[in-house]
Amino acid sequence: MIGLILLPLVWASLAFVLGPGRGKWLAIAGLSAQTWFAFDLAQQISAGKAAIGHQVGGWGAPLGIDLAADGLSSAMLLLTQCVALPLAIYASAYYKRDDAAGAYFWPLMGFLIAGLNALFVSADFFNIYVTLELVGLAAVGLVAAGGGAQQIAAALRYLFATLVGSGLYLLGVALLYGAYGTVSIESVSLLVTAEAPRMVWIAFGLMVLGLMLKTALFPFHYWLPPAHGGSPAPVSALLSALVVKASFYLMLRLWIGPFAPLVAAAPWLAWGPAALGTLAIFWGSWQAIRTPRLKMLIAYSTVAQLGYLFLIFPLLNGPGAIQAGVMQAFAHGLAKAAMFVAAGVFIKATGQDTVAGLAGAVNRLPITLFAFGLAGVTLMGLPPSAGFLAKWQLIEAALNQGHWWLVLVVLSGGLLAAVYVFRVLRQAFLLAPVDTPVLPFTPVPRTLEWTAFALALTSVLLGLRGVELMRLIQAVGAVA
Amino acid sequence: MTSSELLPIALLMSSLLPGLVIFALPEGWVALRTTLNLFGAVAKLALVALLLLGVAAGQEYGVRFAVLPGLDLAFKADALGLLFISLSAVLWLFTTLYAIGYLEGAPHRSRFFGFFSLCVTATVGIAMAANLFTFFIFYELLTLATFPLVVHRGTEKAMRGGTIYLAYTLVGGAALLTGIVWLHHLLGHTEFAHGGIAAALGAEYAGQLTLIFVLLIAGVGVKAALVPLHGWLPQAMVAPAPVSALLHAVAVVKAGAFGIVRIVYEVFGIEFAQSLELLAPLAMLAAVTIIWGSFRALFQDDLKKRLAYSTISQVSYIVLGVALFGPLGTVGGLVHLVHQGIMKITLFFCAGNYAETLGIHKVSEMNGAGRRMPLTTLAFSIGALGMMGAPLTAGAISKAWLSDGATAAGMDWAIWVLWTSSFLNAAYFLPILWRAWFRPAPNAWPEEQILRRGWRETAWLLLLPPLATAIMTIAAGTLAETPGSPLEWAKLIADQEYLTWSP
């Protein structure tokens, strides 16, 4: 488990030492090993080891750093490595050797992955704050690396949002420490009760608010489209597929872990995230349907898809809700990464970032379009795909508790997704207009096309075999 | 894995694998692509023959995979499924041959045949689905696989047709999904079983079950083109002729009708559906669709559009047969599932031939076409007469069983519906035949692309498929009582669905 955190730090530092644009083979090798570690860990947990702990340097809490992995965190680790590895392969072909935009990509990606992995296995509030900041700063660096005025503006906006988000979180941690004198999640879980002092309630509110801001839940999504839509394709994919999932994971963890007594005392709280998630689905889809730019469309689709994750909060006291959330995280992570990298191929080939510029792409870039289509199937929640299973589980969990309107939200969200996905596919199938001169198509490395395809295919195939993933999540809650 | 598990998988793979390979083939590799296509189609036929023999001997075929805990991807090849599979396997072979001839020299054939194979895979999956969950997966897969075929030409008009098609089918799919999850929530499973599964819930769920029935039927009713959910079908006529044949006879519309059969017989159970008073409204809906489709067909000058409205009307014969409470109606509806497919595909092949050979797209351009293309027109006439229910054709058998079923069920009004429809069918088909055979030909055809050589009026591959299906139309009518005919097979199925009746 410790390898999952140390390894990316090692290859990131080495890549930095080697100099701009270097270190891609190190990164790919490191990520391959990490993927193996993640699978190994998942296997151990599925096999019945309820939770795996580790005390860094042999120092336990309250002095040292405690790490712990259960089914949920192991699932997120798996998702992170499985998305990051293809993206690294993609990025190695995407950036040319002396590309200024890619100069610091490898070190930043390494720190980002290390931060994510550490976040998933951290067992105390403060440690998590550190990883949150590491992830946030690395992500801002990646966005800014493009270097254009627009990208700098987007990065500053992003920096502001992420700093405010983690600032709120830190404030919450400080209040908790003031109340209980500890930052270990395990110890706090034992102390929090429904009659907790007001300070704890405020801490809970601040932390959730900060995390919602970092997850770009509507109406805190304003920073996401420019940051995700304006970055180079591998960066957009990393941010949309993984980074926003980290803060969601954390919010879920707090909700079902240490603060569960508070939520149980005030069950109406759960409708807040669900209502915002509903608005996110409609607003994000609507913007995606309207925007003329391809990558903005995909970024707004992220806003919408994140909304589904928050629909599970009112359902958490029944069966199947966490499963639905994790399945949706996997479906969206894989499919959105595929979609952004496919868009990167289109943009490299046509030289323009508009939906209209795709006319005739079906004949020029069939593999990429196929990948985009498969990823679209997942986002629409059509079978067979992980997105379909996520919707099925979500609808069934909602029916189990009689929440009809959630069913309607999920179904209409799927139809809206169909509108924006087919907006793109339709344009790609259209014959290139005869009267305008045919724009030159730059040939694109095959690696780019096939990594997009592999990611999209995984998101679809997961929809035919979700049993193992579900068994892994069964081990949830053993560590909190 | 035993052979009873292997055969259903092999049946799916026989079109899936060739399809996936074809996607990867370069455009110019015509010979390999054609070989793969035909190999897949013939292999599928052979597998279907094996399954038919096995099922007739009482063997059971099935296989299942766990997707989520408590949720299985499950297949079984039973008598009802095989009725549909045999139809689509036979017609797939002919449609493939036809498409090879039709698209000769056209661009993007690898893509076309790839999706074509996916469509048939989805159809087989629908037919073999052993529960509603599996049914839904392949039902939506069919939507996705047909979209690229409908918009294959890439024109603005094709895009509009495709968009309308998607809008209808995806909304229908959402309704279907709601019904399925709801039922799954109530029952804990959605396995198909003879006599239905919903009856287990008991009377206090009658209200919910009625709503579920409406959702499910509305979901599959979109593909079955029930009025008022039929709007996409005439619009989808922009697709190339082999795709129209696929939509109307092999896959899409049939998948909808087949879904209704499964839902009424094996989810609700015919007796239980009758006790919930669901069958009479369904029969009324079918009757309205039959009359409305025939009526609209009268006013279409575009040949393919006229055929499309005719499909809307004819497919509801199947629904009517299903909704008539009683085994005679069941036999009539099921046998029409096959008969309509054979007849309608003949008509679409012929319409494609007229368009490809002479550039004829409209009924008003059909003058004298019979003398220029006698064999095609002969096939067209047989198909059209079959649709009217003329003696010696497959259509006569369907109509006879349906009217008997209506009498037996005490729904005499349904007989009037059938007669009115036959009269309207004659009113829109006979003028075409009259023009083709008896009116003089114009000096020049609209756009003659394939010249006559000897007695070959058009390309081989365009001519043979409609002739073959026309012969099948006659054979299904004249040899209906022989063992192994669609009629006998339909009786076998009806025997299974009604526990107290034998044909």
Image (cartoon, coloured by chain):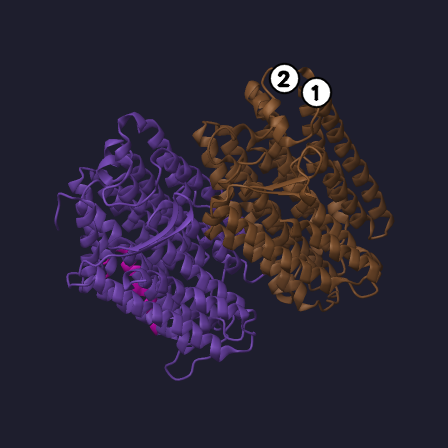
Chain colours: A brown, B purple
- On what subunit does the disc labeled 1 rest? A
Q: Is B424 or A235 nearer to us in this picture?
A: A235
Residue stretch rendered in magenta on the structure:
B375-393
Q: Nearer the viewer, mark 2 or mark 1?
A: 1
B121 is within the stretch colored magenta: no
Asked if badge 2 and badge 1 are on a common chain, one would say yes
Q: Count residues near mark 2 (Cα–Cα under 10 Å), then give few for <14, some for 14-19, many for 20+.
A: few
**Percent position of residue B176, x then y:** 42, 41
Q: Is A112 or B270 nearer to us in this picture?
A: A112
Q: Do callouts 2 and 1 mark residues in contact (Cβ within 8 Å)?
A: yes
**Percent position of residue A4, x then y:** 65, 51
Q: Count residues near mark 1 (Cα–Cα under 10 Å), then give few for <14, some for 14-19, many for 20+.
A: some
Q: Is B175 or B284 nearer to us in this picture?
A: B175
In the image, residue B324 above or below residue A125: below
**Percent position of residue A26, x then y:** 72, 62
- On what subunit does the disc labeled 2 rest? A
The residue under label 1 is A179
Identify the mark at residue A196; answer none if there is no mark: 2
Secondary structure predominantly adopted by residues drawn in magenta = helix
What amino acid is at disc 2?
Answer: Ala
| Mark with earlier residue (2, 1) | 1
Residue B268 falls in image quadrant? top left
- The residue drawn where x is 56% and y is 62% is B153
Residue A279 falls in image quadrant? top right
Asked if one can make out residue A353 in the rendered structure from this viewpoint, the answer is no
At mark 1, the secondary structure is helix
What amino acid is at disc 1?
Answer: Ala
